């Protein structure tokens, strides 16, 4: 039988170890390359799968069967462990035991060590030294728990007290453990105040254990809370051995006041029958019917005393209680189970269950769904690289633009618009000046009043209007797409790729740029000596020259402030003077004045384009630095992704091969399991759950319930 298990374990170990080596090599490389990516779930999942695989390999290589001992606090678990091991391996006292797992296994030489939550392990020369360390640690733990609770926090040794003991390992030269290749695991007592981490400490072992032993005192057999945890054990373990811890020295009170031996000491089977008929629930009843639950009423303290005191205590020192044969029956059943086909079958079944779960995890992290996720990841990396390359190329395209050439048409167009505006201004201003001259001819105002009161205010208003219209015209022209600059489709695509909005930047630049201001108006001065005048008969009679006529008409020619009546203006000046004044103002004032907004606008536009070119070059310099940095980051991410892809593809390929090999092993041993079950059904057509068997010819009648 050991050969069959050894073949099974060897085959499974040889299949898993190459993949374990591969994942050990691949995971660090994936971890180093995973920085730019969100691969936390993958890494944590693969790490968990690797740890599970290591545990499976360790289990099958050591061929160890874990027997977990459960039960409420002070139910006798440690006493049972001492009895099974044949050695004092766990402290038994009135104090709660330290809340950690205690492993007891066969070794060639005695070994004692403990492991703490910080990962450190310490070895001790003997059990007594180890027990003293545990007792001292117990006080320290109580203090740490109290300090944590005083802060209204839930105690967790991983956080609050990492020097707490996590597990104790004891190696003995116990023949019983060696023969069964078993490891006893004593769990913390249920309902203990220091029950922290109970689920976490025992979760892994529920699938690794061959069976579980549940210890409960006879007094607590009918307490519902006790069997809440027991129902969970039935769902997780192939075989449960229920040990009812009895007390053969217990007494009951008679009606007359005398003490008599209690039913627990004289006939414990009646308690078991009552448990089966009265307190049993559906889960427990099904376990009985399936043959997965075996019950043993045992006085554990009495049995442990006999085993540990054999050869050391005198008959007088040994407790005189009876019923030790029940413990021997339990021990025999355990040995038979661990070395029988039932254990072999369940060992394989439990191992396959762990393998299935491990395969499921690997399928999640390496299978079809993972392939889709990695394909999306690869597409994102390639998209990021393409985007970075495009940005660098866009910057290079824009840096090669001849901005003067690009804006040449815009400047020409703007100049033409401003020229057209100038022509319009000349017509408008000439017309308004003519109206002013006509109005002056109808008045008695002097020539000086025409200059100062009529023409200068008009020309000043018109100059401001023209400058404002010019500014509005430039704003309108520069608000066109790209300010009228001519870009190629590639250059426009480059601007869009870099998300450079020229209009926003142009308008912003124009708002902050210094706009052309109106030039100060020159004083209007019409030369009176050049104004045509008409001489009448008397002028000729008295030999008056044109100069004398003009002086008589306007007064002092330097300051012609003499009022001139409408009749005088009509008689002495007439149409020729009107035309002269109009032509003079057009040639000497209007043409110069209307050209000022055009010239100022062109200078402003050229300056603006030059400033914009410099501004855009600065922007492109920043974009190039960012684009090159982004490109290098994308290339680095691509290299890291290639490392991840290489290793995950390697893992995926080997996982597919591993799955086929595991399917082959599973098929091979499933056939064997089915044959074993068929043979057992032929050999054992029926099975009684409670069998009364005469074990001793003495007064005690012990019952082995199987």
Image (cartoon, rainbow, N blue to C red):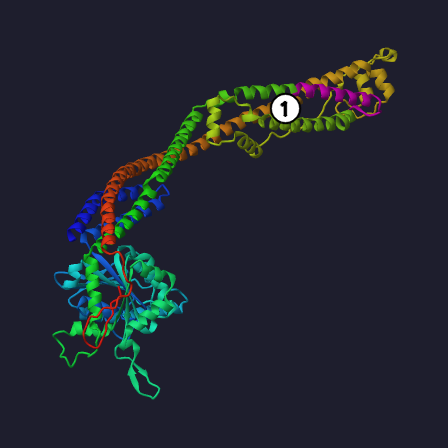
In front: 333, or 18? 333
Position of 205 relative to 602 (above/below): below
Q: What secondary structure is the magenta-colored segment mainly?
A: helix
Q: Name the outermost residue toward the bottom.
A: 256
* Quadrant of the drawing holding the C terminus: bottom left
The magenta segment is 421-447
In front: 245, or 685? 685
Mark 1: secondary structure: helix
Which residue position holds label 1? Answer: 596
In the figure, is residue 688 to the left or right of 5? right
Residue displayed at 34% across by 70% down: 274
Q: Position of residue 166 (x, y in %)?
A: 27, 62
Q: Position of residue 534 (x, y in %)?
A: 82, 13
Q: Position of residue 293 (x, y in %)?
A: 29, 62
In front: 208, or 692? 692
In the figure, is residue 198 to the left or right of 334? right
Position of 15 relative to 254 (above/below): above
Position of 13 relative to 445 (above/below): below
User: Could you classify mark 1 by the number of other residues whose Cα lies within 10 Å: few (under 14), some (14-19), or many (20 or more)?
Assistant: some
Residue displayed at 19% across by 54% down: 63
Using the rendered view, name the quadrant where residue 43 is placed: top left
Q: Is residue 192 visible?
A: no
Using the rendered view, name the quadrant where residue 458 is placed: top right
Give yes or no for residue 437 being in the magenta stretch.
Answer: yes
Give yes or no for residue 535 being in the magenta stretch.
Answer: no
Q: Is residue 235 visible?
A: yes
In front: 346, or 395? 346
Q: Position of residue 338 (x, y in %)?
A: 20, 58
Using the rendered view, name the quadrant where residue 21 is placed: top left
């Amino acid at each position: 039988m050991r050969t069959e298990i050894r073949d099974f374990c060897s085959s499974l170990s040889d299949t898993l170890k190459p993949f374990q080596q591969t994942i050990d090599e691949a995971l660090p490389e994936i971890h180093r390359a995973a920085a730019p990516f969100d691969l936390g779930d993958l890494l944590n999942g693969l790490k968990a799968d690797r740890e599970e695989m290591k545990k499976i390999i360790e289990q099958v290589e050591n061929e160890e069967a874990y027997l977990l001992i459960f039960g409420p606090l002070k139910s006798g678990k440690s006493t049972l462990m001492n009895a099974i091991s044949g050695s004092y391996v766990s402290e038994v006292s009135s104090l709660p035991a330290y809340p950690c797992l205690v492993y007891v296994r066969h070794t060639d030489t005695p070994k004692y060590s403990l492991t703490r939550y910080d990962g450190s392990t310490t070895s001790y020369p003997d059990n007594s030294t180890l027990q003293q360390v545990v007792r001292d640690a117990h006080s320290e733990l109580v203090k740490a728990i109290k300090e944590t609770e005083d802060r209204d926090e839930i105690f967790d040794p991983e956080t609050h007290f990492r020097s707490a003991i996590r597990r104790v390992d004891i190696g003995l030269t116990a023949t019983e453990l060696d023969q069964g290749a078993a490891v006893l695991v004593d769990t913390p007592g249920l309902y203990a105040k220091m029950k922290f981490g109970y689920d976490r400490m025992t979760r892994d072992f529920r699938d690794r254990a061959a069976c579980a032993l549940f210890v409960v005192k006879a007094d607590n057999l009918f307490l519902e809370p006790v069997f809440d945890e027991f129902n969970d054990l039935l769902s997780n373990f192939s075989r449960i051995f229920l040990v009812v811890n009895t007390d053969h020295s217990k007494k009951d009170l008679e009606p007359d006041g005398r003490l008599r031996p209690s039913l627990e000491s004289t006939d414990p089977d009646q308690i078991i029958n009552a448990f089966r008929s009265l307190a049993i629930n559906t889960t427990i009843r099904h376990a009985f019917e399936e043959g997965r639950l075996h019950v043993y009423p045992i006085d554990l303290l009495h049995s442990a005393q006999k085993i540990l005191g054999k050869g050391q205590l005198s008959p007088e020192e040994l407790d005189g209680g009876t019923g030790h044969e029940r413990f021997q029956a339990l021990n025999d059943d355990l040995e038979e189970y661990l070395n029988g086909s039932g254990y072999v079958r369940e060992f394989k079944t439990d191992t396959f269950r762990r393998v299935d779960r491990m395969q499921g995890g690997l399928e999640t992290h390496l299978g079809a769904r993972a392939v889709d996720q990695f394909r999306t990841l690869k597409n994102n990396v390639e998209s990021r690289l393409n985007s970075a390359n495009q940005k660098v190329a866009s910057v290079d395209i824009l840096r090669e633009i001849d901005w003067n050439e690009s804006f040449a048409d815009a400047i020409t167009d703007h100049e033409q618009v401003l020229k057209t505006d100038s022509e319009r201004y000349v017509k408008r201003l000439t017309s308004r000046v003519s109206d002013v001259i006509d109005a002056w001819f109808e008045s008695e105002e002097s020539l000086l009043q025409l200059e100062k009161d009529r023409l200068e205010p008009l020309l000043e208003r018109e100059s401001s209007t023209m400058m404002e219209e010019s500014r509005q015209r430039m704003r309108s022209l520069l608000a066109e797409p790209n300010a009228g600059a001519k870009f190629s489709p590639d250059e426009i695509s480059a601007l869009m790729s870099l998300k450079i909005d020229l209009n926003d930047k142009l308008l912003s630049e124009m708002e902050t740029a210094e706009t052309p201001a109106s030039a100060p108006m020159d004083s209007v001065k019409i030369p009176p000596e050049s104004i045509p005048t008409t001489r009448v008969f008397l002028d000729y009679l008295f030999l008056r020259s044109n100069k004398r006529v003009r002086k008589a008409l306007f007064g002092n020619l330097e300051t012609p402030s003499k009022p001139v009546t409408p009749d005088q203006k009509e008689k002495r000046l007439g149409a020729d003077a009107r035309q002269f004044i109009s032509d003079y103002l057009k040639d000497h004032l209007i043409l110069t004045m209307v050209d000022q907004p055009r010239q100022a606008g062109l200078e402003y536009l050229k300056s603006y384009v030059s400033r914009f070119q410099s501004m855009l070059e600065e922007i492109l310099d920043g974009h190039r630095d960012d684009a090159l940095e982004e490109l290098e980051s994308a290339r680095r991410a691509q290299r890291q992704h290639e490392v991840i892809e290489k290793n995950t593809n390697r893992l995926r390929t080997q996982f597919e091969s591993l799955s086929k090999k595991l399917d082959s092993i599973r098929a091979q041993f499933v056939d064997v399991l089915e044959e074993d079950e068929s043979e057992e059904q032929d050999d054992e057509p029926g099975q009684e759950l409670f069998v009364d068997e005469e074990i001793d010819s003495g007064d005690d009648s012990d019952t082995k319930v199987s």
